[in-house]
Amino acid sequence: MPYASADALLKRSILYYQGRPIGTAAACDDRPAAANYDECFVRDFVPSALVFLMRGEYEIVRNFLLTVMQLRAQQPVMPGHQRALGLMPASFRVVEEDGKERLLADFGELAIGRVAPVDSAMWWMFLLRAYVRSSGDAAFAARPEVQLCMRQTLELYLKESFEAAPTMLVPDGSFMIDRRMGVYGHPLEIQALYYGMLCTADELLEQHSDNEKLRQTITIRSNALRSYVRLYYWMGRDRLNEIHRYHSEEFGIDARNVLNVYPETIPDWIDGWLCPSSGYLVGNVGPGRIDFRFFALGNLLAILVGLATDQEAQAIMRLYQHHWDALVGEMPLKIVYPAVSGSEWRHLTGSDPKNAPWSYHNGGNWPVLLWPFIGAARRTGRADLAERAMFELGERLCQQNWPEYYDGRRGSLIGRRANYQQVWSATAWLIADELMENPASGALFDQFWFS
């Protein structure tokens, strides 16, 4: 029953342009929560693409890659300011005018908060690698226009800034958490995607003299980023004790508290939360700041792209085991823990009612996170956790018509403003089911990620 329902939803969501499949709509709800959910969002298409690749249906993924690449030319030009061609759209839609089909892209100018999508190009690069690995079509990545697209993207994402750290600085709302949630700065999810993008480029850029300097820059940046995240983002019992005993206002090369983090900023909830064998990568790090919240997608992606060490990956999965009720609950999985409330909620979210405590991005549960969780469980040899997540999910997601997200401390309530017939909820289930039931698909899925 769930498989047939999810598969039918995926097929119904396919968007066509001039007779060719080019992507999938975000939702097929007759009464969507937002008008643009009939568009193809770049990040939303990722689990759809993984399903198609595991089934050997390569055409739609190749068409999607070409479509997004070509839509870069639609970037709006503001007087005195032109964005780099490395930026890719958040979404696109097919419209009909005067009997002719057209593609229209959104680069953030229609989004909540009008924030450019930082993660789109990163997900595009990941799907390019997954397509090549799955199909064997290395010639596609070698095409001059694809190579040019990668170079232009890297020129934007490797651009010099005033940042001393190798991490990428971004504003609030520029990735999956696309509303104000206090994640401005150097959010973990972006760092994991950034690292994956750099590894992809190192693998797919042609080996010739024109790319030599760029490849050297990629190697230096990716190595520095990996070391930095492992050093400053990791939070285990020993690291927490170190921060607890920090001296502040230290100067010079011998300073231990390099980022000048004040011990008083350690939140009360984390005391006793970490068992000795568990740990995780914190949500954000910057001058005088550690965001101690647990962000699921950033941690799971860090496992999948190899940004976390093998020991850290095991510790993250043990954290899930130890805090299953809080981090997974009744509907896998919670996007961030804990939720912010009271004056902190007003300050961080701007009193955003959609991000009320334990709802939406502020501690809501998102079924789409099932696919990276199952993937991380496979990579760490924790089949027991993957099986537990699938068992507890059961058929409820299908029976409740594939909601976008769930509310409540344990994810027991269908999201107050959630769409039904949300495609990435269904495709996440399809991926998880395929990985659990089909060893061949699991082996293919494992090739999408970095060693």
Image (cartoon, rainbow, N blue to C red):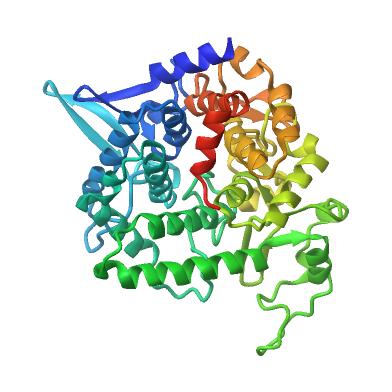
Q: Is residue 332 left or right of residue 18?
A: right
How many labels were placed on the picture? Answer: 0
What residue occupies the far bottom of the structure in this picture? 252
Q: Residue 79 at x, y = what percent?
A: 21, 59
Q: Residue 309 at x, y = what percent?
A: 66, 58
Q: Is residue 339 left or right of residue 33?
A: right
Q: Residue at x 29, y 67 (%)?
A: 211
- Residue 17, relative to residue 166: is it above or below? above
What residue occupies the far top of the structure in this picture? 1
Q: Residue at x 58, y 14 (%)?
A: 2
Q: Is residue 84 left or right of residue 385?
A: left
Q: Is residue 388 visible?
A: yes
Q: Is residue 65 left or right of residue 419?
A: left
Q: Residue at x 35, y 22 (%)?
A: 14
Q: Is residue 353 visible?
A: no
Q: Residue 36 at x, y = what percent?
A: 38, 30
Q: Quadrant of residue 132?
A: top left
Q: Nearer the viewer, residue 324 or 146?
A: 146
Q: Nearer the viewer, residue 355 or 266?
A: 266
Q: Nearer the viewer, residue 426 or 109?
A: 426
Q: Nearer the viewer, residue 141 or 145?
A: 141
Q: Residue at x 54, y 54 (%)?
A: 192
- Residue 71, relative to residue 451: is it above or below? above
Q: Residue 3 at x, y = what percent?
A: 55, 15
